[in-house]
Image: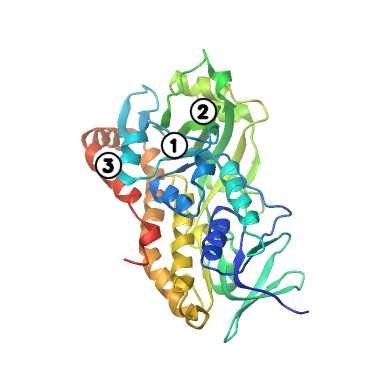
Amino acid sequence: MAAEGADVLVVGGGIGGLAAALAFAKKGCSVLVLEAASEFSAVGAGIQLSPNGTRVLFELGLRDALMKKGTAFVPEAAEMRAWNSGAVLVSMPLGKRVESKFGFPYLHIHRADLHEILLRAVRDASPAIRLENNVRVATVEQQPTHAAVRSTDGKQYSAKVVIGADGIRSAVRGALFASESPPRFTGCVAWRALIPAAKLENVVQVRPRATIWVGPGAHLVHYFVRGGTLVNVVAVVEVPQGNWNEGEPWTQPGNKSELIAAFQGWNPDVCKLLSAIGDDEASRWALFDRNPLPRWSKGRATLLGDASHPMLPFIAQGACMALEDAIVVADCVAGDTSQNWAKDVSTNLERYEALRRERTAQVQLTARKHSSLYHARGAPAKIRDVAFKLARAKLISKMEALYEYNAVEAVAT
């Protein structure tokens, strides 16, 4: 069977994969995006985009779509509250302060809305970018002038470079590094739900900010999306390690009563919020983790986003790290249009790794540490609460250092 080809083959049609496709197309490359699912769609609810992520999206020409009324929501602050008293442990200004300082906004957005914005831009870029569904990668083979990808149904694809953006269960990662251990269950399950904001009027006050409630063995996050018309809720609960079997789907319909029971005794605002979730509108999502990889690339193939550095959702950086990867890998591989970049792919991918590996590993491990920090009990929880109050300026400085990263100029500098 003849191989179908392109300059760049992106495996995975999620946020990182579509962003990479756009970034390479802006460099004049032909791109083929392969997606295992039967259609290009997003799974999940709300996500947070800090300035390091929105900078990339604006660079890709998506500013107007993102800032269209009713699409995203600009929070005025992020705050952490005690699970029982509701006392504010630490608060960080966002909104105008962040946009003024970094030149790009902090946004809350429904994952499906962001994915649709990217997908529309990719389709508008046709024929430079092509999309193909129902393709599951079986092997990735290295050749002197290209990389060859074979699907599970025997179809062959050829490209000068292959980008594995196919998530934590990455088939490309498995093909490149066969000895890698599988993802491990963290012992945490996240419940996700969306509540119409109008339904919460006269029930519970939801402030125009990202709010994290931290408590023993659990935490809960809520914030507005879709211009403030929906409230996104993510509740993370520790469960016995054997509570999620390897063969089970990672996302399942949830039982609302089980969710409410997990937060029994918490602040009344938390309980009212959970009670407002529709009976069939909560889903359970098992949180899996992997250690940072010592290398991402082999020959003409590399990894991006959760395929290389899956992020637990505890510092809201998973999407942003994938967006940063997307613009940097395109700049490293195809940034110098005056040269025949296809000859130097492996060297350019090494440069991409060198620019990205340390940062993403640090964020990945920080997110992992936040699980025990948020879920502390007894004396450690009391120490945490006092530390957050005393070290507010230092905590804000650390987060703002994360936000100031400029992926658009990372290669040039």
Residue position marked by numbered label 3 in the rendering: 395
Q: Along the polypeptide, which appears first: circle 3 or circle 2?
A: 2
How crowded pointer 3 is (Cα within 10 Å; few <14, some 14-19, many 20+) is rated as some
Point out the frontmost of discs 3 and 2. 2
Q: Position of residue 77 (x, y in %)?
A: 36, 32
Residue position marked by numbered label 1 in the rendering: 217
**Label 1 to label 2, Cα distance in Å?**
29 Å
Does residue 206 sit above or below 64 in this rendering?
above
How crowded pointer 1 is (Cα within 10 Å; few <14, some 14-19, many 20+) is rated as some
Does residue 82 sit above or below 97 in this rendering?
above
Residue type for callout 1: Gly
**Label 3 to label 1, Cα distance in Å?**
22 Å
Q: Along the polypeptide, which appears first: circle 3 or circle 1?
A: 1
Tell me the number on the disc at residue 228: 2
Point out the frontmost of discs 3 and 1. 3
Q: Position of residue 305 (x, y in %)?
A: 50, 58
**Which residue appears farthest toward the front when viewing the image?**
338
Q: Secondary structure at mark 2?
A: helix
